[in-house]
């Protein structure tokens, strides 16, 4: 019984901490007048896809003949990521 009480107390404290963090993020969003803040990855942005909106990145690169192989691999990786995201 005591172990269960301790587990629930810890879980409640964790939830309270998460709630406070969410309140802080909401205040930040309102202050900066933004409509979207990523909570898991601060660098990601809300992006439109064929299947709606997702948190993601808009990667861009410039290449020359010496790194064409790298570019092909990068393109294949991005296509695989997009395919997996579209399945969600």
Image: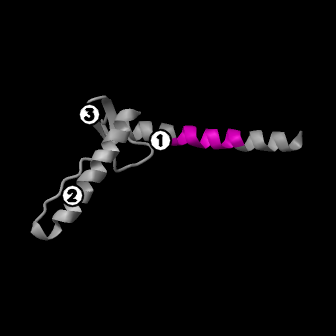
Image height check: is 18 above or below 50? below
Range shown magenta: 11-21
Is residue 36 in view? Answer: no
Mark 1 or mark 2, whichever is nearer to me: 2
Circle nearer the N terminus (1, 2): 1
Residue at point 44%, 43% (across, down): 39
Circles 1 and 3: CB atoms closer than 8 Å: no
Image height check: is 63 above or below 58? below
Question: Between 1 and 35, which is closer to the camera in this rendering?
Answer: 1
Circle nearer the N terminus (1, 3): 1
Instruction: Identify the main secondary structure in magenta.
Output: helix
Residue at point 23%, 64% (across, down): 70
Residue at point 10%, 67% (across, down): 65
In the rendered structure, the answer to whether residue 17 lies left or right of residue 4 reads left
Name the residue that disc number 2 marks: 72
In the structure shown, which secondary structural element does the residue marked by tag 3 occupy? Answer: strand
Mark number displayed over residue 24? 1
Image height check: is 30 above or below 68? above
Residue 11 in the image: state x and y as whole percent.
70, 41
Name the residue that disc number 3 marks: 48
Residue at point 57%, 41% (across, down): 18
Determine the image quadrant of residue 12.
top right
């Amino acid at each position: 019984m005591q172990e269960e009480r301790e587990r629930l107390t810890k879980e409640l404290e964790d939830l309270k901490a998460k709630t406070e963090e969410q309140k802080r993020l909401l205040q930040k969003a309102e202050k900066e007048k933004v409509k979207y803040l990523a909570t898991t990855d601060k660098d990601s942005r809300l992006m439109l896809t064929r299947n709606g909106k997702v948190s993601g990145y808009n990667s861009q690169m410039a290449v020359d003949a010496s790194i064409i192989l790298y570019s092909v691999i990068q393109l294949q990786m991005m296509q695989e990521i997009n395919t997996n995201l579209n399945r969600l």
